[in-house]
Image (cartoon, rainbow, N blue to C red):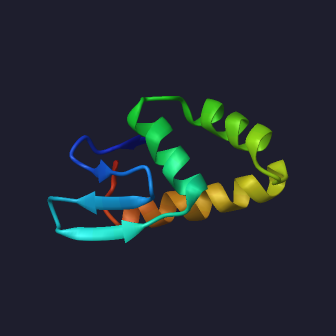
Amino acid sequence: MKIKKNIATSENGFIFNPATGDSFSGNAMATAILSAMKNNEPDEQIRKNILEKYDVTAEQLNRDWEDWTIQLREANLIEC
């Protein structure tokens, strides 16, 4: 999954899509994931990092990852 190049993010969780004018707020985990995506890290590496850093099971991460992907797609933040 790859975030669009024009998407602006900040360290405090602000996300801005200049193409649509939409802005969003994300938590620390969302900010870390978006940063990794902007750095072209593979999904599997991002997931591994989340499992190491946060108190979440692999099963929960898989469910949340699917929801996250849907939200990013609906917000027009990722390249399809």
Q: Position of residue 22 (x, y in %)?
A: 24, 70
Q: Position of residue 8 (x, y in %)?
A: 27, 50
Residue farthest front in this picture: 12
Q: Nearer the viewer, residue 12 or 46?
A: 12
Q: How many marks?
A: 0
Q: Position of residue 68 (x, y in %)?
A: 55, 60
Give the quadrant of residue 12: bottom left
Give the quadrant of residue 14: bottom left
Q: Is residue 74 left or right of residue 46?
A: left
Q: Is residue 29 above or below residue 37?
A: below
Q: Residue at x 39, y 37 (%)?
A: 38
Q: Is residue 48 left or right of residue 27?
A: right
Q: Residue at x 57, y 56 (%)?
A: 28
Q: Nearer the viewer, residue 31 or 4?
A: 31
Q: Is residue 27 left or right of residue 24?
A: right
Q: Is residue 55 above or below residue 70?
A: above
Q: Residue at x 78, y 59 (%)?
A: 60
